Image: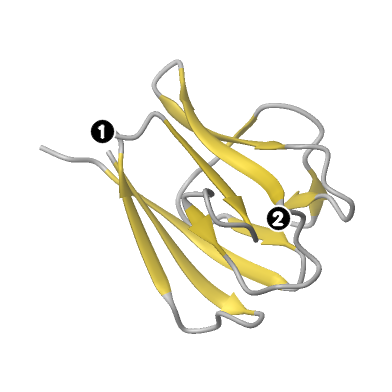
């Protein structure tokens, strides 16, 4: 499957990223080099959250960030399943999730 993140708010607005699962099994989003997705957002922690495959689904997990990770206006408190058209908010940045099945 492929994860597509489209930024609709924040410093990276109008940018898109694509990640294929596999080869990825986990991606880390943060603001330091070494993260799979490095964002220029001062409200994002160094290693803010991760997205991983769990039981065939893509799920998000907050990594103890200062301001939290939000999915559709609810704080993520554990492993949380992502679906297409979800809104993922970290710091000042909001992303629309698109999950594309690969044939």
Which mark, residue 23? 1
Question: Looking at the figure, which quarter contains the N terminus?
Answer: top left
Question: Please, is residue 50 above or below residue 22 in the view?
Answer: below
Question: Please, is residue 53 above or below residue 9 in the view?
Answer: above
Cα separation, mark 2 vs mark 1, equals 27 Å
Question: Please, is residue 67 above or below residue 24 in the view?
Answer: below
- Mark 2 is surrounded, within 10 Å at the Cα level, by few (under 14), some (14 to 19) or many (20 or more) other residues, namely few
Give me the residue at 10% from left, 37% from top.
103
User: First in sequence: mark 2 or mark 1?
Assistant: 1
Percent position of residue 15, x then y: 44, 78
Mark 1 element type? loop
Q: Which residue is mark 2?
A: 72
- Mark 1 is surrounded, within 10 Å at the Cα level, by few (under 14), some (14 to 19) or many (20 or more) other residues, namely few
In-image side of 45 versus 81 (left or right): right
Query: For the residues carrying marks 2 and 1, which lies nearer the camera in this image?
Result: 1
The number of callouts visible is: 2
Question: Please, is residue 100 above or below residue 79 in the view?
Answer: below
In-image side of 67 versus 37 (left or right): right
In-image side of 79 versus 29 (left or right): right
Task: Report the residue that reaches farthest toward the front.
Answer: 33
In-image side of 21 versus 8 (left or right): left
């Amino acid at each position: 499957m492929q994860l597509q993140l489209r930024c609709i708010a924040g410093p990276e607005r109008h940018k898109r990223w694509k990640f294929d699962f596999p080869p990825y099994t986990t991606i880390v989003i943060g603001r330091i080099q070494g993260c799979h997705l490095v964002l220029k957002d001062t409200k994002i922690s160094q290693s803010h959250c991760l997205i991983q495959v769990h039981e065939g689904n893509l799920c998000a997990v907050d990594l103890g960030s200062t301001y939290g990770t939000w999915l559709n206006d609810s704080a993520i408190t554990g492993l949380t399943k992502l679906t297409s058209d979800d809104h993922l908010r970290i710091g000042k940045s909001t992303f629309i999730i698109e999950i594309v099945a690969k044939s």
